[in-house]
Amino acid sequence: MSSNLNNRRWVLVNYPESMPEERDFRLDSSLKVPELKEGEILVQASYLSVDPYMRGRISPTKGYTPGVELEGLMPAGGVGEIIESRADQFESGDKVALENFGWQEYAVVEADMAHKVDTDLAPIQSYLSYMGMPGLTAYFGLFDVASAKPGDCVAVSAASGAVGQVVGQLAKAHGCRVVAIASSGKKIDWCKEIGYDAGINYRKVENLSDEIKAVCPDGVDVYFDNTGGPINDAIMENLNLNARIAVCGVISLADKVGKPDIGPRYLRQILIARARIQGFLVFDYIDRYPEAREHLGKLISDGEFKFKEDVSDGIESMASSFIQLLNSENFGKKLIKI
């Protein structure tokens, strides 16, 4: 079957020195899908994801995973349907998720790279969001890295994004007071709808540090940092005693990858607050994914969970969707329907 199919895929053609542009990528068409080997499956994409981590992957600067080579396939998580299988554990028609699908319509992968998804529990695209990497990231970042406790004041940047939406609802269900920081009034309204207690549109305030102090008068106990940059600076000026900061992402540096992160130094504030700052990657917890999915599944089953998606149509929109995400022009988890 695979020999009769043509694939379309996006490759990297230039390492951007600042904010990526569409010309840094190229859509290749009419590519033959390779024949399957024993133990492999052929998956047709239903949805693909764009995520902030991809910015670091398109830089020659060393990161936590190998970068994309020029003319290399752009990375992406994907969900879809198996249309051919030469692996015992899968058959045609199975719905699966892949962390390394790539910006393409078809993927041939080893079967152990895929896992079946339960579309009775949640829609297939949710396994790229709250039931997938963003949801797992929220769970481990909040409970393991930040050690959130009932009664904590939890501040979340990019609060209406893929990870932030889940962090807020997990923290609220855990008995925390939750504060959203986002880039528009509409995003803040959505955050309050899903359970955030307060919100700050950082683009509309004169002094973000003062605004955080007003909504967190006793200081911030937990900061879930999805952005870095000036929002992080403002939080550092408002830490409560024994504050914990989980560094999940630095999307504010999307135009500065490989360059110095210039800003104030807050070692004295960290010292006085006896604060703990920890970076983390969701892959650090791969052996505990079932635990997180069970917790998230219970939250969803309770019927109170809400999640917003921002969906574009067609493989043609991959590059523009990625750039929208980096510029905070998305509203919700950015997905591409194939």
Image (tube, rainbow, N blue to C red):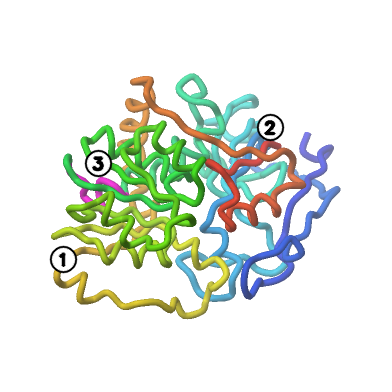
Q: Which one is earlier in the sequence, the residue at label 2 or at label 1?
A: 2
Specify whether residue 215 is painted magenta: no
Q: Going by the image, does 232 lie left or right of 215?
A: right
The quarter holding residue 247 reads bottom left
Residue 226 or residue 47, whichever sits in front: 226
| Residue 113 image offset from top left, x and y in percent | 52, 44
| Residue 332 image offset from top left, x and y in percent | 53, 41
Foreground mark, 2 or 3? 3
**Residue at the disc numbered 2:** 84
Q: Residues within 10 Å of mark 2 (few under 14, many from 20)?
A: many
Residue type of the residue flagged with mark 1: Ala
Q: Going by the image, does 286 lie left or right of 69?
A: left
Q: Which one is earlier in the sequence, the residue at label 3 or at label 1?
A: 3
- For numbered disc 1, what is the local secondary structure? helix
Specify whether residue 144 is painted magenta: yes
| 42 is higher (above) or lower (below) than 103 | above
Q: CA distance from mark 2 to mark 1?
A: 57 Å
Residue 314 or residue 216, whichever sits in front: 216
Residue 148 or residue 6, whichever sits in front: 148
Q: CA distance from mark 3 to mark 1?
A: 19 Å
Q: Residues within 10 Å of mark 3 (few under 14, many from 20)?
A: many
| Residue 100 image offset from top left, x and y in percent | 57, 49
User: Which residue shows up at 17% across the image and 40% down it?
Assistant: 150
Residue type of the residue flagged with mark 2: Glu
Q: Which residues are magenta?
A: 141-149
**Residue at the disc numbered 3:** 177
**Residue at the disc numbered 1:** 273
Residue type of the residue flagged with mark 3: Arg
Q: Are marks 2 and 3 in contact (CB under 8 Å)?
A: no
The C terminus - image quarter: top right
- For numbered disc 3, what is the local secondary structure? strand
